[in-house]
Image: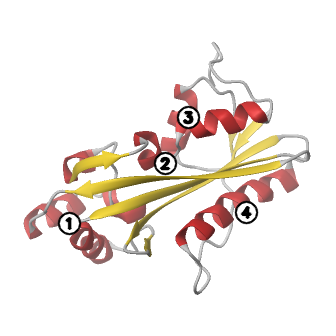
Amino acid sequence: MMILASASPRRRELLQQIGVQFRCEAADIDETPIAGEAPQQYVERMALSKARVLLSKYPGDVVLGSDTTVVLHGRILGKPADSADAEAMLEDLSGQTHQVMTAVAVVSQVAERVQTVITRVRFSSLSRQQIKDYVATGEPSDKAGGYGIQGLGAVLVDSIEGSYSNVVGLPLTETAALLQQAGISIWNKDRV
């Protein structure tokens, strides 16, 4: 059985979209970046840590761990602490191009594979009122960088270069390849 080491409804929907059969269980780990840690090292460490925690509980299974972060000028923008933090993040992103970085780790007793996908996202120039109105919707509260491209935040994005599903939270092409290498099939008729 494949386990998704996440409580993210977006990751669950993306895996269902490609017909993967799985069950979900969130991994409780410390997600604090280490001083001086590069963004790619951070997301890879998080994805592997999540997967390894659940593999230790279910050693006979294949576990998929993933972590997504927004990176602006080398700085990691995680989930906002509160509304003021979300507004500050969106002000920083306004009119800028940033990276969305997702690491996908597929682990089992046999092997560990991890891959990082980077998508470049350009934000429109946002007014102070647009930022306040968007934050007031509540959508930014649990999203890296304070926005969701698959939701109301879609209107903030001017353009993307790379994988759209990566920005949502799971790069599907790369994830499917990693799962198939681990013996997990996609395109199942009976989706979970």
For marks 4 and 1 on the same chain, the one whose residue lies earlier in the sequence: 4
Q: Is residue 82 above or below residue 165?
A: below
Question: Gap in Å between the C-alphas at discs 3 and 2?
Answer: 13 Å
Please give the name of the residue rendered at 79% of the width and 57% of the height, measured from the top-left corner.
52
Question: Gap in Å between the C-alphas at discs 4 and 2?
Answer: 17 Å
Kindly identify which residue carries mark 3: 173
User: Marks 4 and 1: which is nearer the front?
Assistant: 1
Q: Residues within 10 Å of mark 4 (few under 14, many from 20)?
A: many
Question: Gap in Å between the C-alphas at discs 4 and 1?
Answer: 32 Å
Q: Give x and y (percent) for residue 113.
A: 75, 49
Q: Which mark is residue 49?
A: 4
Q: Which mark is residue 169?
A: 2
SS class, disc 3: helix
Q: How is the image coloured?
A: secondary structure
Q: Give x and y (percent) for residue 172.
A: 54, 36
User: Marks 2 and 1: which is nearer the front?
Assistant: 1
For marks 1 and 3 on the same chain, the one whose residue lies earlier in the sequence: 1
Q: Are circles 3 and 2 on residues that touch, CB within 8 Å?
A: no
Q: Nearer the viewer, residue 4 or 111?
A: 111
SS class, disc 2: loop
Amino acid type at circle 4 is Ser
